[in-house]
Every structure is written in structure tokens, then in C-alpha cells.
Image: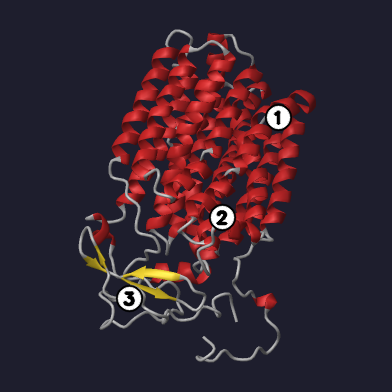
Amino acid sequence: MDDRDDIAGLDGPNTGNGKRQAAVGAAYREVTDSKGRVYRIGETDRDLLGHSRKLMVYLPWIAMMAISVSEYAYGSAEDTLSHAHGWTQSNTFWILSVWVFFQAGIAFPAGWLRERELLTARRAMFLGAALCLLGFAALAHLDSVFLAICGFGVIGGLGSGLIYATCINMVGKWFPERRGAKTGFVNGGFAYGALPFIFIFNYTFDTRNYEQVLDLIGVYVLIVVAVCAWFFKDPPKNWWPADIAPSSSSQLPSRREAPHSFAGNKKSAASLAKNPPAVKQFTPKEALRTGMLPLMWITLVMTAGVSIFGISFQVDFARETGFGPLVAASSMGVMSVVNGVGRAVVGWLSDLWGRRLTLVFVIVVLGLAQFGVIWAGKIHSEWLFLLFAFLSGFGGGAFYPMFATLTPDYFGENYNATNYGLVYSGKLVSGLFGGGLGSMVVDAWGYNGAYALAGGISMVAAAFALLLHQPGRIRVRDVAPNPRPISREMI
């Protein structure tokens, strides 16, 4: 028996027989499985959107690339900002830490508002774009550290967080059957989208032009995000693709009863075999009571802290080690690209391996990379430094789509905006010890001590990730030997 053996066929009461989607007139039915989970079937993506749901992958991806400059290129701009405004290195690190705090902190309240239909996805994106513009304007024109923290850290962080959370939840809702690869692809844009700005900040960004450059970046973010947001639309609650069975063992209504054929496809079936749908739609309170959501939160806190530490200190460590500006910029560029591409690759891999195994693999790679950076610095090897920057970038980004997909896999899609908001709020704490507190550790222990601590924290996080399992799903080790066969009547 495996984890899918307790999934009954979807042969419960058809509660939605005869219902129609008012806007386009597409018929749908609601069917219930043995766990009580409801699936809304029959409507295609084209019925609901008027076009393919693939657009709900590409548009969030573009928007994520636009806002990536706020976090992944910030480290390359710190020296110029310090000289232009008279800030210390600690000042610039704390500005980023506050940005991370509010970027992560808005996810839960934004999700709560969206699920109560008080804030639509489109409005959340428009608001986020405007706040990002204000954030970059504050970073450009305000010399006061406190005002810069309020402007870029608080306002800009809230704007980026609104956009990030909306994009991640959007793709998860439209691709419930194969969300790993799709979510990883969209999430990847949040890293490698910063690549052009990393080189701009390292080579052409100085005290003579920093105001104009930051103002133009703010306008760029505003325009790109607003255009993408215009086409954003959520699917109905409980929606499931018309031609995909929710699991390989599910028995959907016959073709004569249903408006569409449920032939599905091999990729979706393989993914669902490794990552079956949640047994029910868990509310945030129910998800917390399972114990899995708090465990995911703790794991994310530690892993994201190590990732943010690497983003914040990679360039400075390279310079202190004696590597030139090209290596310093390239190491951050490599980290940014691999951070993003790794998210897409790992998302695809999780559809084949399963989410938990893939998550553990990613966190272990991240931890080993921290020790590798120390070694490369000690022997002054530029190519090894770039190699471990590559691995650090891979591990430091790829875990994000794993948590973004594990959350609806474990707790369902209907409350995913708030459930994922709770999990992602772990980045609130991570931003503090990864950036600001990380700077204190560097001052006290040096870069080698700080990187060694980061590597150890990653290994502890990997151990916690091994404890994750889907709530309500029977696991192999929980089944007694020679269990009594489940009859059709029992289902």
C-alpha cells in the first residue's frame, strides 16, 4: 500500500448538477471524494478565461522578474548608496532586512483579504506596483536612514510582497495538477530577473547618476507589473482541469455524464502519483493544528535565513578575499541566474521525485555550498568560488517553490493564499538574522565563522524537512501488516 491507496473514487453526490458558470455559460459539476473534498469539474481554462491558462504562468513570471531587482540586485548597489547618503554598511543591511520583513509579512493579510474577496488579484498587483515606485523614489532621494527604511524597507517591501504573493498563488490555483514545474518557473523570475541590474549597479551606478537610475527602475516596475495585472483572474473555488483526473486511482463521472473526457496526460498522472492532492481544504486554523504548517514555517525560517545571508554578503566576501570586481559581480550574477533557473528545474524535479525529497536535497546542497565558499576563499580560487556561488544560488532559491507547492499539496487550494502566507511569514524572521544579525555575526566571527554557522543551520533545516508528511494521508509506516482489504462498501 502506498500513500494513494486510501483515495476513493470521486463517486460521491454530484452537488452541482446543472449549474452553469454565469459569465460564459460553461456547465460544471461538483463531485466529492471519500474524504469529503469537493472538485469542480467540467469547465476548461478557455471557458473561464477565454484563452489558455498558460497566460497565468507567463504574466506572473514577467511581474516577478520586474520586482526581483529590489532584493537580488540590492547587494550590488550598497556601496554607492552608502557613499551617496553617508550610510554605514550596517545601515544598508538593515534597510534590506526591513524590506524582507515587510515583503514576507504582507503575504498573510493580503491572502486573508483576497479569500474574502475584499482585494482582487488585479487590485493587489496595481497597489503593489505603486508602492514599489514609492520605495525606489525613497531610496534615491532620502538621506535619512530612518526615512529610507520607511520608504524602501516598509513601503517598497509591502509592494513587492503583494506582487510576489499574488503571482505565486495565481499559478498554483490554475495548475493544481502539476504545480511544481509551473510554480518553480514563475518563482525563478524573482531571481534571474535582477541580472541586468546587478551589472548596472556594479559598473555604471555611481553617486552622479544614482537618483535617475533608481527613479527609472521604479517606473519600469510600475509599468511592467501594471500591464501584467490587467489580465489577472482567479479560477472558481474547487476548480479542477476538465481533462485531468485528481489522482491516478480516481473514478470520475463517465463521458456520458460529464461534459468533457477525462483522459488526462502522462505528466499530470505521474506528478499526482508522487504528489497527491490534499485530502481536504484546510482552513488556516486546521492547518496549524496538523503540526505540519508550523514545521514548514520553522524549516523555511532557517533555510531562508541562510539564503538571505548569501545574497547580502556574497559580493562583500568576494571583495575582502581579494577577488576583483568582475569576479564579485559575476559571483552575484551567477547566484542570481542559478537561483532562478534552479527554482524552475527543482519545481519540475519535484513532480517526478515528490516535494519532500526534493526539498531535503535542495537544503543539503545549500548547506554544503556555505562550507565550499569558505574553502574557495581560503585557497583564493576564483573558479571554485564561482562554483560554490553557483551551488549556493541553486539551493538558496530552489526551496521557495517547494514550500509554495507543498502548502496547497498538504492543505488544498481554497485557503492557499492565507496558508502560504503563514508559511512564507517565516521569512520575516529570516530577514532579520540573515541580513542585520548576519552583519553582527560577520563583525564578531568574521566571514568564515558566519558562513560555517550558515552551513550548520542548513543541515538542521534539512533534518526538519524529513519530518514533513501530508496531513490525513495514510503512510506506509502507519499501516499494520496484512491490513484488512478495503471493500467498495467501506468507501
Q: Residue at x 32, y 76 (%)?
A: 263
Question: 64 or 240, which is in the foreground?
Answer: 240
Q: Are marks 3 and 2 in contact (CB under 8 Å)?
A: no
Tell me the amino acid under the disc marked 1. Answer: Leu
Q: Residue at x 45, y 81 (%)?
A: 9
Residue 331 visible in the displayed image: no
Question: 99 or 18, which is in the foreground?
Answer: 18
Reading the chain from its start, which is encountered first: label 3 or label 2?
3
The image shows residue 179, relative to residue 441, as above or below, that is: below
Q: Residues within 10 Å of mark 3 (few under 14, many from 20)?
A: many
| Circle 1 residue | 437
| Circle 3 residue | 262
Q: Are marks 1 and 3 in contact (CB under 8 Å)?
A: no
Q: Are marks 1 and 2 in contact (CB under 8 Å)?
A: no
Q: Residue at x 32, y 35 (%)?
A: 226
C-alpha distance separating marks 1 and 2 = 30 Å
Reading the chain from its start, which is encountered first: label 1 or label 3?
3
Q: Which mark is residue 13?
A: none
**Residue 185, x across and y down, in percent:** 43, 49
Q: Residue at x 46, y 34 (%)?
A: 160
**Residue 262, x across and y down, in percent:** 32, 76
Question: 49 or 26, which is in the foreground?
Answer: 26
The image shows residue 152, relative to residue 347, as above or below, that is: above
Reading the chain from its start, which is encountered first: label 1 or label 2?
2
Residue 455 visible in the displayed image: yes
User: Is residue 452 left or right of 311 when viewed as pictured?
Assistant: right
Q: Residues within 10 Å of mark 1 (few under 14, many from 20)?
A: some
C-alpha distance separating marks 1 and 3 = 53 Å
Tell me the amino acid under the disc marked 2. Answer: Pro
Tell me the amino acid under the disc marked 3. Answer: Phe
| Circle 2 residue | 284
